[in-house]
Image (cartoon, rainbow, N blue to C red):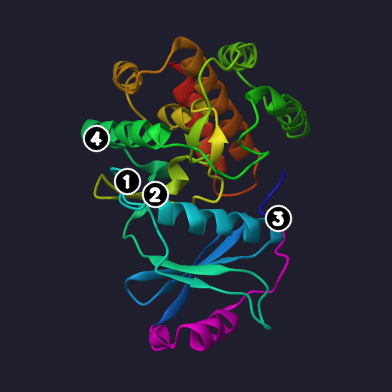
Amino acid sequence: MTAYPNSDLNIDEELVQSLIDSQFPEFSELSLKLVGSGWDNQNYKLGDQYLVRIPRRALGAELITYEIEWTQKLKGQLPLPIPAPIRVGKPDSSYPWHWSILPWFEGTAARNTFLAEPELFRLVHFLKKLHDISPEGAPLNPFRDAPLTSKADVIDERIQKNKLVLSPHVLKLWEEALAQEINTNPTLIHGDLHPGNIIVKEGIIQAVIDWGDITKGDPATDLAILWMLPMTKTLREDLVEEYGATPSTITRAKGWAVFFAVVFRTSGTEYEELGANIFSFLKSS
């Protein structure tokens, strides 16, 4: 089993508070509380309205610069809220990388949430708009801008190492996706669009977060989200039609859903359940 990688630095509340005090003293009196730590960043709630996002790994330090740049560019262009930074922290003698203060979005990740039909259509319209924006200048991202075939060895290794058994149907979806050529132009993509990066409150999408993997790539990478959320087969077909995906893109999107399912199921983190859920959704596809 894998798990979140070790942090490259020791980041704690004292360090974060000192960075706020020295760079943004107007926020110094606000309460500070650790609310999450993921693959690349630690997140602290700042008062009632803000979130401090601070890289814990060198890779995350690179990705957060892309997130800062592109959420600022995309702010106001998309039909769902995104966390464009309110302040951007700079490296100093106590911490070597950029960090950010973002708006706080109330709610929970959509990992165990049923979204009503109108919200799912909002998500599809969000994807259509995002994929329509010029990808010129988008950062390179070898983890997400490469074709699905580049993931085959990694996925096979994870399956064998973790003794994961895929159903014949899911294996068929994976093999069909690998056989597909990309027949669409590269678009701007979120790159890491899964239920953990969609914040929901009372069934309403509040924000799409975590933009560090933004890149120019296959839109099927993002469209895979439709096989990561619970819905009827008919509704999923309606959403795919609303997006306007080609049959080849649909096949690749299912393959990307398999990719995410395997990664999550073998992650050794709280995302294992999400991986299992995605496999169950794919069975009815």
Find residue 264 and report its horizontal and vertical position in percent: 59, 39
The answer to whether the residue labelled 4 contacts the one labelled 3, judged by CB atoms less than 8 Å apart, is no
Q: Which residue type does callout 3 highlight?
A: Pro
Secondary element at image label 1: loop
The answer to whether the residue labelled 3 contacts the one labelled 2, judged by CB atoms less than 8 Å apart, is no
Q: For residue 74, which numbered disc appears in the image?
A: 2
Q: Which residue type does callout 2 highlight?
A: Leu
Please identify, in this view, whether the residue under mark 4 or under mark 2 is nearer the observer: 2
The answer to whether the residue labelled 2 contacts the one labelled 1, judged by CB atoms less than 8 Å apart, is yes
Q: What range of the chain is rendered magenta? A: 6-30
Q: In which quarter of the image is the N terminus?
A: top right
The answer to whether the residue labelled 1 contacts the one labelled 3, judged by CB atoms less than 8 Å apart, is no
Q: Name the residue under label 4.
A: 116
Q: Name the residue under label 3.
A: 5
Using the numbered discs, state the Cα–Cα distance from disc 2 to disc 1 in whole angstroms. Answer: 5 Å
Using the numbered discs, state the Cα–Cα distance from disc 4 to disc 1 in whole angstroms. Answer: 24 Å
Secondary element at image label 2: helix
Quick one: label 4, few (<14), some, or many (20+) residues within 10 Å? few
Q: Sequence-wise, which precedes: disc 4 or disc 2?
A: 2
Q: Sequence-wise, which precedes: disc 3 or disc 2?
A: 3
